[in-house]
Amino acid sequence: MKWLWPCWLLLAPACVSPLSALKQQRPVAALQGTFVIQYAPVDDTTQTQLVNAIEKALPTVAQWGPLKAPITIYLLPSHEDLESAVGRHGYDWLKAWARYGEIYLQSPRTWSTRATPDAEVIELLTHELTHCAMYQRIGTPETWAQKDVPLWFREGMATWTAGQAYRWPALEELSHFLNEKRGDPIDSPEDLYQHESDIVYGAAHHAFSFLVMRYGTAKVQTLLDAMGRGLHFDAAFTEATGVSAKSFTLEFERFVRWRAFRGSGKSIHRNDMLRPVGR
Ligand SMILES: [Zn+2]
């Protein structure tokens, strides 16, 4: 199921209109952060589900550091309102969009014809709040969007943290995609975003999992801290791991294309190994 989207682009001026209809406010104070949910009366029940999801997601997100700045969650009553708010059109699978201190969320009430289970809302909030935690750790409201964090790292970190491997193509499928030379979802994902987002998110998830397998989460923390000190992504990556980000992604692509995950021992034999530890 496609339902997430990279979350770094600035909003278009046109976003003001749907947000102005969200006149209800629900403050939420938690140990790991403070939030305000802005919503329309039609989502009076949904915002209660959202409060629960925030509280359930926060302990997992906290591994990436505190949410230093308050976060406003705009609970948009329809998919059209979400697309209008974020200035993106033609992305049927889009459900949410995160920035430094804001999350734009299509109301879970409208995700499908059935009632959305709490677990799906928690999963999505975990993904989006991971973006916020990273942005707040690596920069300020003025600098976070200028750190040149590549999509594979940004989205891989979020989907890894939210345990979303089951949503994306497995390593075998990714290997097939790469060997057919249908595109480069790691280093040139732009052409694939809109119509092959599953492969983009899958590649991001597996690349981030590979990073954790190779270097451990401690090096990821070091990388984030280096960006927090002012480095851009490439310099911070090299400082944290001792190799360039380009060398790493090439190594990952070889790992996938040559199907090294098949027979290199128990630790990398099964695709589900590349899911978050402990989830
Ligand atoms: Zn995302």
Image (cartoon, rainbow, N blue to C red):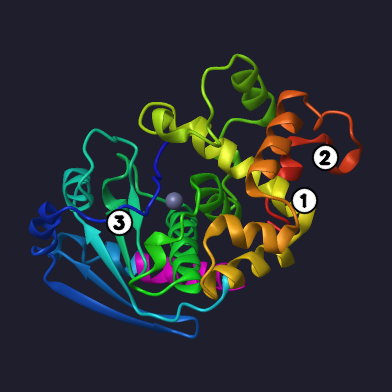
In the rendered view, would you say 232 is above or below 91? below
Look at the image and say whether residue 54 sits in the magenta stretch: yes
Label 3, ligand 1: CB separation under 8 Å: no
Q: Quadrant of residue 261?
A: top right
- Residue at point 21% right, 66% down? 44
Q: Secondary structure at mark 1?
A: helix
Depth check: 236 or 114 in front?
236
Q: Label 3: how many residues lie within 10 Å, few (<14), some (14-19) or many (20+)?
A: many
Q: Secondary structure at mark 3?
A: strand
As shown in the figure, which amino acid type bears the numbered disc 1? Answer: Met
Of the two numbered discs 2 and 1 on the same chain, state the one appearing first in sequence: 1
- Residue at point 42% right, 28% down? 192
| Quarter that holds the C terminus | bottom right
Q: Nearer the viewer, mark 1 or mark 3?
A: 1
Which residue in the structure is indicated by mark 2? 268
In the rendered view, would you say 63 is above or below 156? below
Which residue in the structure is indicated by mark 3? 105
Depth check: 86 or 250 in front?
250
As shown in the figure, which amino acid type bears the numbered disc 3? Answer: Leu
Which residue in the structure is indicated by mark 1? 213
Along the horizontal axis of the image, is 57 left or right of 121?
A: right
- Residue at point 74% right, 30% down? 254
Would you say residue 152 is visible in this rendering? yes
As shown in the figure, which amino acid type bears the numbered disc 2? Answer: Ile
